[in-house]
């Protein structure tokens, strides 16, 4: 069953406040565009709040993945569906110092990763992400060179991280997956109203714990749209109102 924050259920919740029926006054096209903007902005706000507020993981959970990624020539290439990093990457540190720690972990989550470390006699060390200039300064340093106990890295592209020490073999990364365009499917009726169509809907996996922030943002946009149907720039409107 879809949660209260899904694209399927959010529209009736908004229209009920204004005592409106599902009609072209607030069309599925406009609603879908607004929902996708709100979804993306909420993800960004939650990522920004992590890790100082670890509770945001409960809301982000449907979009979070964790992967053990190989290090090739000192570089880590992030997955194709990578959007934002959560926290900091981690490396293994064991007695052999080879960057390995047991076999594959399935399913790989923050908890199973921690358990595997304990079973394999490994520790994890965070990779400090620094500016590129600091990375080059540190790697040229004779007294502050990165070690397995204090590895560093920098983003050498949107989906690539340069890591030092260079002989690491794997890095664990927890990240939020890229946005998917959600679609509210519908069937238009002769009287200009419409009915929800699950067969053409691409619903969102937001849980009910995200209902309040999504609803508040959607209501703000609905209120603006009700007064001026020609007005756009929905992301700017939310930023001006300080919704996220």
Image (cartoon, helix red, strand yellow):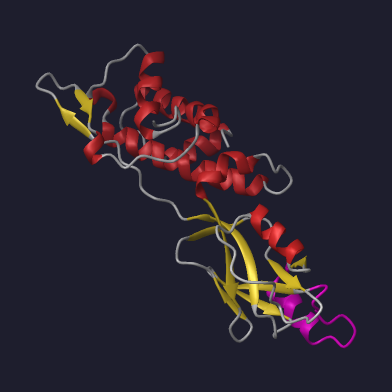
**Which of the 4 quarters of the picture holds residue 60?**
top right
Q: Is residue 80 left or right of residue 85?
A: left
Q: Is residue 211 above or below residue 54?
A: above
Residue at 46% in and 41% down: 39
Magenta extent = 127-150
- Residue 154 is one of the magenta-drawn residues: no
Q: Residue furthest top?
A: 19
Q: Is residue 220 above or below residue 79?
A: above
Q: Is residue 153 left or right of residue 142?
A: left
Percent x, y of residue 26: 29, 26
Q: Residue furthest left?
A: 190
In this orientation, which residue lies closer to the viewer: 187 or 231? 187
Q: Residue furthest front?
A: 119
Percent x, y of residue 71: 61, 79
Q: Is residue 26 above or below residue 41?
A: above
Q: In this orientation, does residue 130 appear?
A: no
In this orientation, which residue lies closer to the viewer: 15 or 237? 15
Q: Is residue 164 left or right of residue 2?
A: right
**Which of the 4 quarters of the picture holds residue 229?**
top left
Residue at 35% in and 43% down: 182
Percent x, y of residue 169: 65, 80
Q: Is residue 5 above or below residue 80?
A: above
Residue at 87% in and 88% down: 142
Residue at 36% in and 26% down: 11
In this orientation, which residue lies closer to the viewer: 203 or 48? 203
Percent x, y of residue 1: 39, 31
Quarter holding the C terminus is top right
Q: In this orientation, does residue 17 appear?
A: yes
- Residue 132 is one of the magenta-drawn residues: yes
In this orientation, which residue lies closer to the viewer: 31 or 180? 180
């Amino acid at each position: 069953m879809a949660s209260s924050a899904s694209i399927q259920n959010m529209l009736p919740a908004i229209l009920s406040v204004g005592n409106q029926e599902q009609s072209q006054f607030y069309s599925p096209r406009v609603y879908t565009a607004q929902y996708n903007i709100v979804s993306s902005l909420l993800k960004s706000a939650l990522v920004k709040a992590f890790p100082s507020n670890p509770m945001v993981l409960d809301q982000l959970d449907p979009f979070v993945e964790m992967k053990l990624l190989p290090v090739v020539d000192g570089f880590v290439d992030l997955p194709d569906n990578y959007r934002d990093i959560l926290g900091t990457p981690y490396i293994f540190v064991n007695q052999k110092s080879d960057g390995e720690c047991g076999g594959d972990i399935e399913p790989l989550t923050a908890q199973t990763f921690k358990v595997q470390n304990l079973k394999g006699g490994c520790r994890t060390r965070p990779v400090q992400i620094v500016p590129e200039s600091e990375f080059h300064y540190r790697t040229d340093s004779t007294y502050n060179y990165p070690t397995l106990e204090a590895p560093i890295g920098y983003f050498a592209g949107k989906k690539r991280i340069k890591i030092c020490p260079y002989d690491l073999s794997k890095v664990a990364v927890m990240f939020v997956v890229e946005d998917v365009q959600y679609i509210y499917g519908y069937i238009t009726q002769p009287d200009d109203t419409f009915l929800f169509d699950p067969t053409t809907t691409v619903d969102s996996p937001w849980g009910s714990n995200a209902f309040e922030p999504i609803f508040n943002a959607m209501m703000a946009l609905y209120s603006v749209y009700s007064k001026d149907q020609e007005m756009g720039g929905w992301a700017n409107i939310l930023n001006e109102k300080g919704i996220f």
